[in-house]
Amino acid sequence: MAELKGRVALGMSGGVDSAAAAAVLLADGWGVEGVTCIFHDDDATHAAVRDAAAVCARLGIRHTVRDSRAAFEARVVAPFVRDYAAGLTPSPCVGCNASVKVPELIDVADELGCSHVATGHYARIAQRADDGRFMVRSALDDRKDQSYMLALLTQEQLARLLLPLGGATKLAVRAMAEDLALPVASKPESQDICFVPGDYADFLAERGVEGVPGDIVDAAGTVLGRHQGLHRYTVGQRKGLGIGGAPRPYFVVEKDAAENRLVVGFQEEARIRGVVVGGVNWQAIEPPEEPLPCMAKLRYRSTPCACTVEPRADGAAFVRLESPQPTTAPGQCAVFYAGTTVLGGGGIIDVVREGAEGR
């Protein structure tokens, strides 16, 4: 029997991607421990645990369940609720990987004597030969690339992380799962925020974020209608605003929490020329001291755009866009790329709309 490369704790969500990741790791000579971290106490979680256990049984590996509810509540759910209450539009999944999912996996790995951890993300990890620095690179399958979601991981986390699906396509993963008769081969993907079972406004209301109705205004301050609470709207939203009579559709361009106003504008007013990013996590490089030309994604599914990142002494950066882009929202993440390599990323704390003065 061939000697094992080592032992790895694989995060298993009960879906096809993590199931296929287990099979790839086994074929590559790793000893695999299946780990399912519980973030909620609901039917979907119980079903995920059963599915992950069934996959582990099929592959002949051990399955461990980790109760991570307290960490998830403190580091993901509570900040999500707080940010929405403050008028932001948070992107919880990016922060969750760095603050909960990977740290929890590493804790379990240490308990089980595993040198590495792994997930089913579609991305790749590389290590630079000259200085040993780790970096995330985009997946070979552009349609499934999840490198954006890993932009906040630290060097210490990347040093222990394996991403076995970075060179695979979703079609190939499904085919592999079917060939191996894995119980989740045909299980559909989940696209929603995992801890919000339905309407996120209802979820926020259960957490005490009711929202106060206020004015819908244009950039000049003209009142066009009434909103039902800022947390019920998203920057960039076009439908469901309840205002009409204009020759063209309105878009949400800002949630003014201080004045409890929803600011709308036409499409050209919903474009931005820059964003301010706070607390940038520089991943593939040391923090730059000079302006850095690169590409940026301002939302998970957005198209990368050319920009120049201008670092600030406080660790923040102004991202000057080479051409106006569709608006994004404070609370989202900006992730910087050089080719397929993630340079770093951080949370957007302000946006500069087209035609605005200063930055």
Image (cartoon, rainbow, N blue to C red):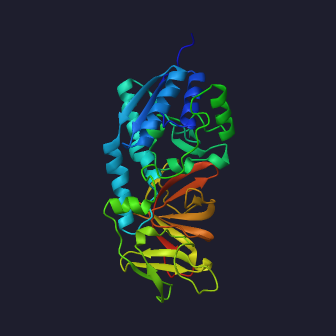
Taking the image as drawn, is residue 188 in sight?
yes
Residue closest to the eye, 65 or 115: 65
Residue 324 image offset from top left, x and y in percent:
62, 72
**95 to 162, vertically: above or below:** below
Quarter of the image holding residue 59? top right
Q: Residue at x 50, y 32 (%)?
A: 51
Residue closest to the eye, 57 or 339: 57
Residue 316 image offset from top left, x and y in percent:
43, 63
Taking the image as drawn, is residue 5 in sight?
no
Quarter of the image holding residue 292? bottom right
**225 to 208, vertically: above or below:** below
Residue 127 image offset from top left, x and y in percent:
55, 38
Residue 76 image offset from top left, x and y in percent:
38, 51
Q: Residue at x 57, y 10 (%)?
A: 1
Residue closest to the eye, 123 or 311: 123
Residue closest to the eye, 182 or 286: 182
Furthest-front residue in this view: 43
Give the number of marks: 0
Quarter of the image holding residue 163? top right
Query: Is residue 182 left or right of 216 when viewed as pictured?
Result: right
